[in-house]
Structures are given as C-alpha cells and as structure tokens.
C-alpha cells in the first residue's frame, strides 16, 4: 500500500482535538475535556491490554502501513503528531495518531495504564522489542469500558478472525457501548468499533 497524499498536524492540534472526543452514545459527553494528556515513550511490556486477541490480518496491515510511512520518512512507532492520509486506490481520508493509553485506578487500588486504541501497533512494537510513543491520558471523566487483562500480554492470543464464540473483553457494564470513546467524532476514519455490536 502506497501513500499518495498526506498532511501532518502538530502536537497542539492533536491535544485540542482529543479534548473534544465524545462518547459513542452521547455527543455531549467529552471524557477527556479536563484530562491531563501527554505523549510518552513507553515499553509495551508496561502496558495492560484489555482485549484477549490480536487479529492476524490486522497485524499484517500494521506492518504494511509501517512500511508505507517509512517511504515518506515517518516512523509510526514514534509519532508526536497526527497525520491525515490517502492510500493508493482509496478515496477515503484516514487518520493515524499515536496509540492511546488511559490511566485507570482499579478496585485493587493499583494504577493500570490501559490500552484504549492501537492494540495491534503496540503488539507489533512488543514483538519487535521496541519502545513506542503513546498518547497517555490521566483523569478521564468516564471509566474505560473494559477491564485490564489479569495476566497482561500472557492472556492475549493471535487469531485468524473474530467469530461469535470469541471472548473479546471483560466489560465493566452490560451496555458497554455507553462507555465507548468515539474518536471518529473528531478524527477522520481513525478508529471505530468492529461492527457496532462487537465492541
């Protein structure tokens, strides 16, 4: 996949947009409005995934995307801004930003850095034993919609595809979509649920 056009947006614009991200089921609820947001370089081993799977094809697509951005001199593991871009043979504009991590205080009193978005890219960094830049969010007004995996990366498996029997996450509430952050509310084609019923 070749990048035929792109536009970069600076750190300040990235933070401003993140503050305006709304909840999926409530356009007037902005969970990061008063959050402390930074970009930090982190060892993936220090992060807690909240989903049990990595999809093989999506992992390959991140490898391909990494190679595409390399051709324009951009390392997608070390982003400090966000990019809008078009791929060859595609009409839609996509957005890539650093993976998103949220700090969460759980019932055991411990602070967990939860992977909110960018799981496959972080997993690729884990496999390649490299550190990665993430958007680190402290003080979200809403809890993340899933719990951290008890054994962290040891609980994650690579699968070919999702099916009705796939155990995806351990949700905090039954109507988990109420706690889903809608990054597409401010970023074009950035991140969306894999089927509205499969969050």
Image (cartoon, rainbow, N blue to C red):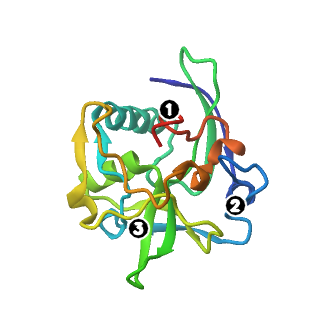
Q: Residues within 10 Å of mark 3 (few under 14, many from 20)?
A: some
Front residue of 152/11: it is 152
Depth-wise, is mark 1 or mark 2 nearer the camera? 1
Could you tell whether 24 is left or right of 150 in the image? right
* Secondary structure type for disc 3: strand
Q: Quadrant of residue 191?
A: top right
Instruction: Give x and y (percent) for residue 121.
Output: 39, 47
Q: Residues within 10 Å of mark 2 (few under 14, many from 20)?
A: some
First reached walking from the N terminus: tag 2 or tag 3: 2
Q: Quadrant of residue 130?
A: bottom left
Q: Which residue is mark 1?
A: 195
Q: Which residue is mark 3?
A: 42
Instruction: Give x and y (percent) for residue 178.
Output: 61, 52
> Quarter of the image containing the N terminus?
top left
Could you tell whether 109 is left or right of 179 in the image? left
First reached walking from the N terminus: tag 1 or tag 2: 2
Residue displayed at 65% across by 41% down:
184
Say if mark 2 contacts mark 3, CB within 8 Å: no
Q: Which residue is mark 2?
A: 15
Could you tell whether 60 is left or right of 15 in the image? left
Instruction: Give x and y (percent) for residue 104.
Output: 49, 73
Could you tell whether 135 is left or right of 159 in the image? right
Residue displayed at 54% across by 18% down:
88
């Amino acid at each position: 996949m070749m990048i035929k056009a792109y536009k970069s947006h600076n750190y300040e614009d990235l933070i401003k947009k993140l503050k305006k991200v709304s909840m999926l089921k409530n356009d007037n609820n902005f969970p990061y409005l008063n959050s402390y947001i930074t970009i930090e370089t982190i060892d993936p081993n220090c992060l807690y995934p909240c989903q049990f799977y990595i999809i093989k094809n999506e992992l390959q697509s991140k490898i391909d995307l990494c190679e595409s951005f390399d051709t324009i001199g951009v390392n997608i593991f070390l982003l400090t801004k966000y990019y809008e871009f078009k791929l060859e043979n595609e009409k839609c504009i996509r957005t890539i930003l650093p993976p998103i991590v949220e700090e969460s205080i759980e019932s055991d009193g411990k602070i967990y850095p939860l992977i909110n978005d960018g799981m496959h890219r972080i997993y690729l960094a884990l496999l390649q034993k490299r550190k990665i830049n993430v958007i680190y969010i402290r003080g979200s007004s809403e809890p993340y919609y899933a719990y951290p995996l008890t054994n962290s990366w040891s609980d994650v498996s690579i699968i070919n595809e999702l099916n009705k029997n796939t155990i995806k996450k351990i949700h905090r509430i039954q109507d988990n979509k109420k706690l889903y952050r809608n990054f597409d509310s401010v970023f074009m084609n950035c991140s969306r649920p894999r089927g509205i019923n499969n969050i």
